[in-house]
Each structure stands twice: as structure tokens, then as C-alpha cells.
Amino acid sequence: MPNFSIGVDLGGTNLRIATVDESGQLLEKVTLGTKVALGKDHVIGEMCEAIRHQIEKFATTGHLFGIGIGVPGIIDMKTGTLRESPNLPGWAGTPVHKEIERRLGTRVILENDANVAALGEKWLGAARDVEDMMIFTLGTGVGGGIVIHGRILHGMTGMAGEVGHMTVEPEGHPCGCGNRGCLEQYASATAVVRMAKEAIHSGKSPNLARAAGSDPEFSAKAVYNLAIQGDEEAQKIFRRVGRALGLGLGSLVNVLNLPMYVIGGGASSAWEAFAPAMFEEIRQRSLVYAATAPATSLTGGQGASAQIEPEGPTKTLITRALLGSDAGLYGAARLPMM
Amino acid sequence: MPNFSIGVDLGGTNLRIATVDESGQLLEKVTLGTKVALGKDHVIGEMCEAIRHQIEKFATTGHLFGIGIGVPGIIDMKTGTLRESPNLPGWAGTPVHKEIERRLGTRVILENDANVAALGEKWLGAARDVEDMMIFTLGTGVGGGIVIHGRILHGMTGMAGEVGHMTVEPEGHPCGCGNRGCLEQYASATAVVRMAKEAIHSGKSPNLARAAGSDPEFSAKAVYNLAIQGDEEAQKIFRRVGRALGLGLGSLVNVLNLPMYVIGGGASSAWEAFAPAMFEEIRQRSLVYAATAPATSLTGGQGASAQIEPEGPTKTLITRALLGSDAGLYGAARLPMM
């Protein structure tokens, strides 16, 4: 009779709801579209209905810890409300969790999506054997979450982990945040597409131009496909991704000296294309990494956590996330158990 | 009858020993030269004699918590020994604290000098009203220490806080660590002198050339004096200091979202010369700072901690250290009390 909780991944496109037991076993998962256009009340209604369905189904098997919800945006940690969320227009400032608590009669915890991804990878993924870690999520933007002593580091106002806005090129590409040269401008899926368009525009890359011309939804994935097929311009783009990640990571390895840094999010599936340049940069730039790098640092990759010694970690591992898009779902489910 | 402990600041030049009671009151302080050339045993002998003298003097007034020692270098947190210390040649790898414990029969804790400075400012200085903070120490190099939930963040192998080796200019000046463009290459006293010599060499600065020619120990202080007298080239150097600090701080404010960042170390006395450029850079580069900056952010300065609200901090304060060179001494004394 395992106890369980409900994890929700409330994205701008998909709404996913899962029941996860305390051992990390997935009991059920549903994916719905997030009908943002129909308004907040509609989305909350659909979410509550799906949650209620799962709670009823598993209520006889054990105790419900509560509901954890991962959302893209900044959470006010004092009130638990959503403060800012570009992908959920109209949601900011409303006490979302109170409304859901009222409807379902159980505890609801709201958390930033990168933070729940960090927690998911820490609980069941790449970082399951360490107490301290951070994640970089490479998606439309670049997010981040830091876990210290097994718990999310929220910072003073819940804004900790904004690694996407570290400056990696002081005179670099302008960012929506007002800065220039933010990591996000080089290491997000959006940035990959932008750099590909720049290469097409410069006339240097007939292959990229062909791919973009034939694909109305030309994406980072298409650029990656060309890179692994050997296209030099596409490879150059991912070397820029790797360099930018290496610059950001190199500085953070020096400042935080964590045992593990996990690279997740959709664009992390291009790992083979960007990781060599990333590791080269980190090795050159981080004296802490140089002092603590594992022998197999070039590959990083999966199963790296097996290298951790019983008396505690002594090597800096930089590795891919293991849970894919489920990291946030597991992390959200973990919240009410902590 | 206050209880007390002994704090030691074991620098490459000076050896300072202080008795501090649990309320933070300084009861006695002595400064000796660190006779590095006479060897480790000699220095430890002198240190122990001075400590013993102070212990005996205050033994009747209260209980001795123990001895805390701040040293420049990397401490192995598992064994408490000094792993690397460029300014204390021949000390690395020896169980310094065990030797002192044996001679004095009381607990000895070794800690990195920037970490004890952070702890000192947190206990009695600029950061006394916050639980989370970090310090940048601007001296021969640039060091750093992070305090989370009132305790030093050591990281996996005791190397956390190496902010001096964050990359702030990817193609910048080479650093001894093997990287290019480390913060230390722009914001240390050493860097100020180097940049002044570069300006002299370029023929652009007759005032700096005159100052350097007349002063065999031409220092960052001399460059600062010219800057406050209005010399444009000297001012430009401190604007570069400020820009580099702003680049590093901007990224860390985004990643850590701490309530307070303290700038200490000898070169922080040039605050007036570098702070305006530093704040300008941070405001441009950090969305977290933009969301949390206090109204008086330009001046920073002393008394800033008075702005913290009773329900917890909500503003990012970036301010000068308050305890000067005593921060490390107080922080070291604090160690055995924790």
C-alpha cells in the first residue's frame, strides 16, 4: 500500500498529470493540451478533474501526500502564487494553488519548472546519488535549478537559478531581459534556430538554407540532424552552444563546487553535438574542474553517477539528464513528500 | 563571565591572534609578522605561544570554545588539513590543526581566509541581519565566500567561492589558473597595478608614469589616489574594475538571488572609484537585480542593512564590507562557536 502524490507539469502547451508513489514509481500519467486561450478557470477546471480522477483511483492503495505543480515562471515563495509567467498569460498574481486546494481539499505546492526538473533528476535521475546539484534546462529559453542539501535553493525572492541570464559574451547578442550575451542567447533551442538563420543569411550554408526552405517548422532538431550528418556550419552552431555552456558552467563550477551539473531540457538531446566544445571550454576555464574532473569527463553521459565514492563525491560530474521531459513531473510529485 | 574563542588570521605576511567573546566583543588582539622563511614549526610555535598567553589571560572569565584559524589556501574539509597555499610554502598536506590541537589541548578549526571573512561580516559586519550572503575579497587576488542559512558553503571539496576565477572577459587577460579573462585579472590590487603599467606603457598617462617613477612600491593605492584627484586614465582603470565586478556579480545575482553581496579586502577601499561602473553594469545585466534593487542602489555603502524588512529581506543589497581586515579574525573566532 504505497503512499503517493500527484505531480503536475503545467506548461504553455501541454498539461501533464501523474500519480507517483513514494518509491518513485509512476502509477499513471495523462497528457492534455493546455487550452490557454480558454482562460485560467477552464485550465484549472480540467486540471482538477484529471487530478480528482487519479486521486479516486489510487485512494484505496495509500495516503495522498498532496499535489505539486511545476509552472514556467517566477513563484512568490512567501505566498505560493505565480508572480510572472510569459507562457501563461493572465495567470500572474492569482493565488492558483489556493483555488486548487479549495476545489480538491488537499495541499498544493507551486514550484518553478526548472526547479522541479532539478528535484526530479535529484530524486530519480542523474543526480540521485548526490545531495547537491544543479540543472540547466535547454528549451525555448535556458532555465536552471539548484539543489543544496537535497532541497531547492529558492534564493531571497524565489528567483535563484536564472542561469539562462548569466553573461557569457559581454558584447554578445541582445537578450529580451535587457542584457547582451546571456547564455540563453547561445544555448536555447531558440538560439540554435537564430544562429542557423544567421548562417543562412550570410550565404555560408546551403544545407541549412535547404532544410529551412523545405520545413515550415524549421527547428533546432533540424539543425542537429545536419550537424550529425557532418554539415560544418551546423556543427559550428553547436560548438557555439557548447562554448557558451562551458563559459557559464566553468564559472559556476568555480563558485559552487557542486558534485553534479545536469544538462536537461529538449535541446539537451543534441548533447553529442555540443558536449565536446562544452567540456573543452570548462577544462580550460575552471581550476576547480581541473582539480576534480573524472577521468571520463569527455563523454559525461549516462551512468556517470556510478563513479561516486561511498564516502561522498570528490569528482565534478557534468552529465545529461536521465528523465527527459518527465523530470519536472517527478519533481513536482516529490514536492508534497518533502 | 562571557565565553570566548581565539581567532587567528594566518596570512603570508601577518599573523594576527584575537580573543573574541560570544557577543562579538574583541577582548585582545596581537599582530605578529609571519616568519614564513623560518619554517612552519617556527610559525606554529610562535602562534601557539601567543594563543596560550591569551587563553591563560581570559580563562578565569569564561569557557574557551576553541580556536579558529583562517588561512589563504584550499582546505581539505574531510581531514581539516591545508591542501594548497601559495603564500605559505611548505605547509600544504600537513595536519596543521592536529599539531596545534596537540600542543594546546583544545579544538582547532582551519578555514579558508575568504570564508572566514564572509563569516565575520555575516556575524558582526555588513551582513549581520541576513542568513544568506556572499563576499568578494579584493586583494592580491580575488577570493570569495558564500554563506547559506548562516553557514559557510564549502562545496564538494572545499573549493566553493572561487569567484576570482569566474570568466568575465572570454578573450581577456591570461590568468595564472590557465584561463583567460578571470575576474581576478581585472578586480584585484595586482590587476589595478598591471592595468596602470599598461597605461603607462601606452604613453597615455603621464600622471601614472610620474607616480610609478617616484614610488618604488607603486601600488593600487597610488592609482586610486590619482583617480580621486581626477586623473582620467586612473579613473578608467577603476571603471574596468567596476565593470568586471558588475559582470561577475550580475551573473551571480541571477543565479543565487541572495539578499546581500559584500565587497571586502584591501582594494575595496577604492569603492568610490569602482562602484558607479559596477552598479551600472549590474543594473544592465541582471534581471534579478532589476526586480529587487533597493532605491539607493547607486551608493550601496554602509548602513544598508538597515533597509531589511522584519519579515525577511526582499531587496538585493550590494555593499562594502564593514570590518576591514578584522573580518577574517572575527570569522575565525566564530568558527568554534557554531
Image: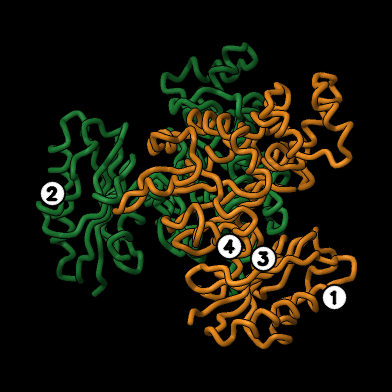
Chain colours: A orange, B green
Q: Chain of mark 3?
A: A
Check disc 4 and give the amino acid type: His
The residue where tag 2 is placed is B49
Say whether residue A219 is left or right of residue A251.
right
| Residue A42: image tag | 1
Q: CA distance from mark 3 to mark 4?
A: 14 Å
Mark 4 or mark 2, whichever is nearer to me: 4
Q: Chain of mark 1?
A: A
The residue where tag 4 is placed is A154
Using the rendered image, report if marks 4 and 2 lie on a common chain.
Answer: no
Mark 1 or mark 4, whichever is nearer to me: 1
Mark 1 or mark 2, whichever is nearer to me: 1
Q: Residue at x 68, y 53 (%)?
A: B289
Secondary-structure class at tag 1:
helix
Q: Residue at x 73, y 23 (%)?
A: A233
Query: Which comes before the other along the chain, label 3 or label 1?
Result: 1
Secondary-structure class at tag 4:
loop
> Does residue A35 lie above or below A52 as drawn?
above
Query: Which comes before the other along the chain, label 1 or label 4?
Result: 1
Say whether residue B69 is left or right of residue B286.
left
Q: Residue at x 52, y 68 (%)?
A: A25
Q: Residue at x 48, y 82 (%)?
A: A1
Q: CA distance from mark 1 to mark 4?
A: 30 Å
- The quarter of the picture where residue B245 lies is top right
Say whether residue B321 is left or right of residue A6.
left
Secondary-structure class at tag 2:
helix
